Structures are given as C-alpha cells and as structure tokens.
Image (tube, helix red, strand yellow):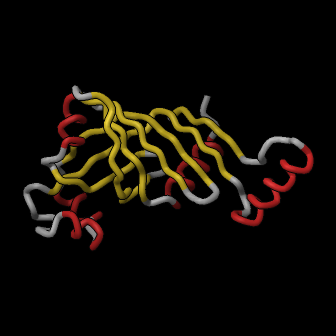
Amino acid sequence: MTDAGDQKQLVDLIDDIPIAMLTTFGPDGPRSVPMARQEVEPSAQMWFITARDTDHTRAIEQEPRVSLTFSARDSWVAVYGRAAVVDDSAKLKELWNTFAEAWLPGGPEDPNATLLRVDVEHGEYWDTPGGKVASLISFAKTKLTGDTYDADHGEVDV
C-alpha cells in the first residue's frame, strides 16, 4: 500500500540528490554506472540524459529492469523500476544543460544524445531530518543509550 506522504518524501529526497548509481541487468549481468538525474516528477518518474552508444543503454533495451541508489550526507534512497530509451527531441532540449554538454559536446542535436526514462515501481528511503546536527545527536544517543540510530524510513509502491 502506498502512502501519499511516503511517496512525496521519496520524491523530495530524490529531487535533492542529483547523482544516482544506475544498475542494469543486461546479458552480461549487473552493471552500475553513475548518472546525473535531470528531473524527477511527482509520480516518481525520472529522466536522465545519456549517450545512445553505451553499455547501459544496450542493456536496458534488452532488459528494462533497473535499480537506482542515491546517497547524501543524511539521506539514502533505493528504487527499482523499468527504464526505457526515449527519443524525444523536445524533451531532450528541455532538459539539456551544461553538465550534459560535458559528456555530449554535440549538444541536444547530437544523434548519439538520447534520454532514459525510469518509471519507479518501488522505493525505499532513510532520512535523518535536521541534517548533520541531528545525525550527530542521534549517534551520541545511540552510544549513550544503546538504542538504534534515529532515521525516518519508508517504503513506497508506485
């Protein structure tokens, strides 16, 4: 069962962490690569700009299941779902930025530039509200009381 608050928390956390490790499950087995997330929608659908001639795009075309992990100083997110290589020049131009240009210097008109869309099916997050200070207090409390680390945790089926 999906709680709307948990889904919003998941999306908000992902929106704050721009880099993910994308794991594909192609014919050569699991393979992970860092990817810069361009957009995350309220439905937990994510967009990435990538090169068409990569191992991860070829793997997705053969097996669309993917896993994404995001990590920040005080929050962590793991999601899985289905990915698709999407040829949409208008969306590519909308999402294009200088970071993408570092990898694809030909710009959004480059025939090797394409999009990955990930439709999240399930996600899980751990968050320490309050940032570094709250994390330090929680660690100290753990040492003093023997209780476990305080973190918000949620699971979402999308």
* Residue drawn where x is 42% and y is 57% of the image: 19
Please, is residue 47 above or below residue 156 in the view? below
* Residue drawn where x is 9% and y is 62% of the image: 110
Quadrant of the image occupied by residue 134: bottom right
* Residue drawn where x is 92% and y is 46% of the image: 145
Give 108 or 34, whichever is nearer the viewer: 34
Instruction: Count up the numbered dots.
Output: 0
Please, is residue 44 above or below residue 13 in the view? above
> In the shown orientation, is residue 48 left or right of residue 141?
left
Q: Quadrant of the N terminus?
A: top right
Considering every residue shown, the one lying at the far right of the view is 145
Q: Could you say where residue 100 lies in the image, as x and y percent from the top left?
A: 26, 65
Q: Could you say where residue 98 lies in the image, as x and y percent from the top left?
A: 27, 73
Quadrant of the image occupied by residue 138: bottom right
> In the shown orientation, is residue 5 left or right of residue 42?
right
Considering every residue shown, the one lying at the far left of the view is 111
* Residue drawn where x is 11% and y is 55% of the image: 112
Considering every residue shown, the one lying at the far bottom of the view is 98
Give 23 or 119, whichever is nearer the viewer: 23
Q: Could you say where residue 41 lies in the image, as x and y percent from the top left?
A: 44, 52
Q: Could you say where residue 69 lies in the image, as x and y percent from the top left?
A: 47, 45
Please, is residue 2 above or below residue 86 in the view? above
> In the shown orientation, is residue 154 left or right of residue 81?
right
Considering every residue shown, the one lying at the far front of the view is 143
